[in-house]
Image: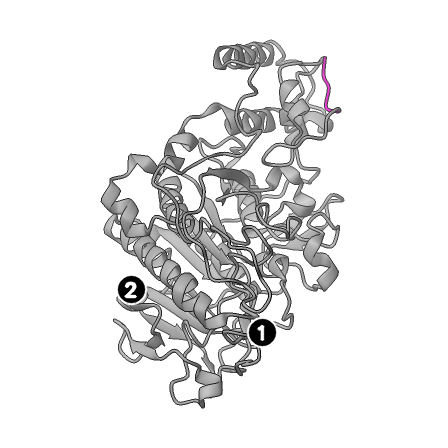
Amino acid sequence: MLRILGSRKTLCNGITRRDLLHVGGVGALGLGLGDLLRAETAKQRTPARPDGQAKACIFLFLFGSPPQHETFDPKPDAPREIQGEMQSIETALPGLRIGEGLPQIAGIADRLTVVRSMTHQYPIHCCAYVMSGMPKYSIPLETKPRAPEHWPFMGSVVDYLDGVKSGVKSPVMPRNMGLPWRFCSRGSSSNQAGPYGAFLGNGYDPFWTDFEGAGTTVVPKLNADSQTEKVLDPHAGIESSARFRLAPGCGLPKDISSRRFDARRHLLAQFDTARPGIDRLAAVADYDEHQQRAFSLIGSNRIRQALDVQREKAALRERYGMTLFGQSCLAARRLVEAGARFVTIFWDPFGPHGASVWDTHSNHYPRLKNYLLPVFDQSYSALIGDLDERGLLDETLVLCTSEHGRTPKIDSKPKGAARHHWSRAYSSVFAGGGMARGRVVGRTDAIAGDVVDTPVSPKDMQATTFRLLGFDEHATVPDHQGRPYPIAGDGRHRPELLG
């Protein structure tokens, strides 16, 4: 008996566990979880661009926003209240100086595209705005991930367009994966908007992993004046035995053995063979492809093997850093090797709000010097170097960005100082997959407060990403009513970024 109602306990991609249990209960037309996954959309063939170079994308999102001054746009000639306590250093790219807290990244700068002119109008935690084509944003939307105003996440768009272009709805590896756990699910900001399928449907949410392990390092406090909690943040240190796994609900239910699961799949295959004369009604036209998508989510061991970073040599794991961020970067490389298309790593809050986030409204310098910059420097440089050494960098686009930047002038009142939200000018860094090697794009004024040359919006980043992944940046995706929405909003691809 077909049943798609019941318990609201959801799986990793928004499907209920009851739905999965009833995938084998076929009705007259053999519908089940596959039908549930069917987006209520009109079929649209999206032309691929012949110059698409990237086979995969790794998207690093540093929630809370790093300061441009202490990372990729230092101002060594600015007054101390602008430059701050940290100096700049030379890099492998002649003429480029970056913050002294990133010495390993300085050594690989000739492989990067540094964009110093990111800009938009929302100095708030507008993660969903930066990750999607939506044209407007507001503070209330920050904690309403399912609000109808939201547009699909970049990875969700790639998942949808790949399915339409190829006709394959059940790839061996999920196309849209999120690490290390569902976005903001381990901190107090558990409903942060951003990486979701929006009007494409919950079936296009990222395929989430989860993390088993404890933090080993107490991180500098978010608020040195008032915080009493000591936070053992895994982003700063984990034991080597810690591991990634599929999020709860992404594996087979305990009462369904793999043999029973395979038997159900075989039974449905027999049913399909016996129904060639059944009319393909519009309501079930996508039955086959979405049934296959449902099975692909739970039936393959390739995901589990790719997530098992303990298969790597200890020396390589140490190179990435025995931290949650470092091991997430290593897992992302393994997932890409295994065929994943779009893998996102979220460095987001753990424990009390902001405990692992880059939102330095207080204790700015202790957090940067003793936690955030060293971890990022080691893990990011290892990821780029490892991809390059394996011959994967030219075909793997690596994006690293955040929702905004931080104020040019330092606030000296909080203990440890502070920089606050600032979106008029900030930095991002891109590599591989068709991005230029050894290029600086854009320029800010003398205090890194405003863009004075080559402004680049988050939508431009998206349009360029889609182009490199093989899609026309003017392509559209349909909402529930079939209305077309541009995949990158008003963004345009930027040839200044390309190699």
Residue in view at x 59 percent, y 45 percent? 185
Is residue 425 in the magenta section? no
Give the percent coordinates (x, y) of residue 77.
Answer: 39, 89
Disc number placed over residue 420 in the picture, else none: 1
Q: Are marks 2 and 1 in contact (CB under 8 Å)?
A: no
Residue in view at x 57 percent, y 59 percent? 228
Residue 10 appears in the figure: yes
Q: Is residue 36 above or below residue 382?
A: above
Residue in view at x 55 percent, y 78 percent? 407
Point out the stretch of residues depicted in magenta: 1-5
Check disc 2 and report its element: helix, strand or loop.
helix
**Distance between the alpha carbons at the discs numbered 2 and 1:** 26 Å
Q: Is residue 449 above or below residue 32?
A: below
User: Majority secondary structure of the magenta segment?
Assistant: loop
Residue 492 appears in the figure: no
Identified by mark 1, the residue type is: His
Give the percent coordinates (x, y) of residue 269.
Answer: 55, 13
Foreground residue among 335 and 442: 335
| Residue underneath mark 2 | 104
Identified by mark 2, the residue type is: Gln
Q: Is residue 12 above or below residue 187?
A: above
Disc number placed over residue 459 in the picture, else none: none
